[in-house]
Image (cartoon, grey):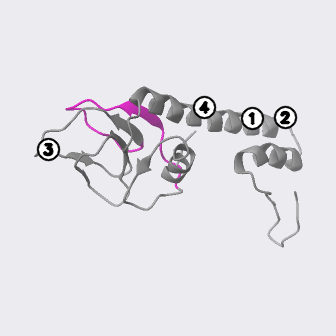
Amino acid sequence: MKLSTAILANKLKSKFALQNKKALSDRLHLEQVLFYNDGDEMLPHKIYIYTQKLEAAQELIVPEEAVLFCMGKMRTRNTGKTGQVFQLIDDTSPFLLFNEIQRLFDYYGQWEKKIYEMAEQGSAIQEILDESFRIFHNPIIVSSADYFVIG
């Protein structure tokens, strides 16, 4: 299961005081959450949590399609349009943040697995849509190319 920065921010903002400067993306590309250690290379499609304090002249460079959660304010720079930096402005435990992000991966992963199982078992489209309602909290309509409502 992959997450987007929009899903991440929308689900975490009710539990943490987050700040970010860039527009959020709906693209599902984030695969894993990790703690960042100084000297590690940040890779695309990963979520990093950074807990150390930087020297005054240092700044963290966030590559394309990576996400960085900074515990407190620090200097950061993106290498492109899709890198995202979130700053947690309250005194949050990085372990609580890590666990909450992992719960999001688990939650959406369980839904994805359930949908695949239902499709393999030949469940009706309406049953699959009903299962998805708890994720999207909105009605979903599936129609054919000629706008005939399937479910």
Identified by mark 2, the residue type is Gln
Q: Secondary structure at mark 1?
A: helix
Residue at mark 3 to residue at mark 1: CA–CA distance = 46 Å
- Quadrant hosting residue 47: top left
Residue 50 picture location, percent across and down: 31, 35
Residue at mark 3 to residue at mark 4: CA–CA distance = 35 Å
Query: In front: 25, or 53?
Result: 53
Residue at mark 4 to residue at mark 2: CA–CA distance = 22 Å
Single out the mark in the foreground, 1 or 2.
1
- What is the number of the mark on residue 58? 3
Residue 143 picture location, percent across and down: 82, 64
Residue at mark 4 to residue at mark 1: CA–CA distance = 12 Å
Quadrant where the image shows the C terminus: bottom right
Q: Secondary structure at mark 3?
A: loop
Please say if 40 is above or below 80: above
Using residue 14 as the reference point, say whether residue 75 is left or right of it.
Answer: left
Residue 115 picture location, percent across and down: 75, 39
Residue at mark 1 to residue at mark 2: CA–CA distance = 11 Å
Which residue corresponds to the image point at 49% horizontal and 58% vertical from the top-left? 25
Query: In front: 117, or 58?
Result: 58
Residue 75 drawn in magenta: no
Residue 35 picture location, percent across and down: 35, 30
User: Residue beneath label 2, please?
Assistant: 121
Boundaries of the magenta span? 27-45
- What is the number of the mark on residue 114? 1
- Residue that extends furthest to the front in the rendered view of this protein: 90
Query: Which badge, 1 or 2, is on the more N-terminal residue?
Result: 1
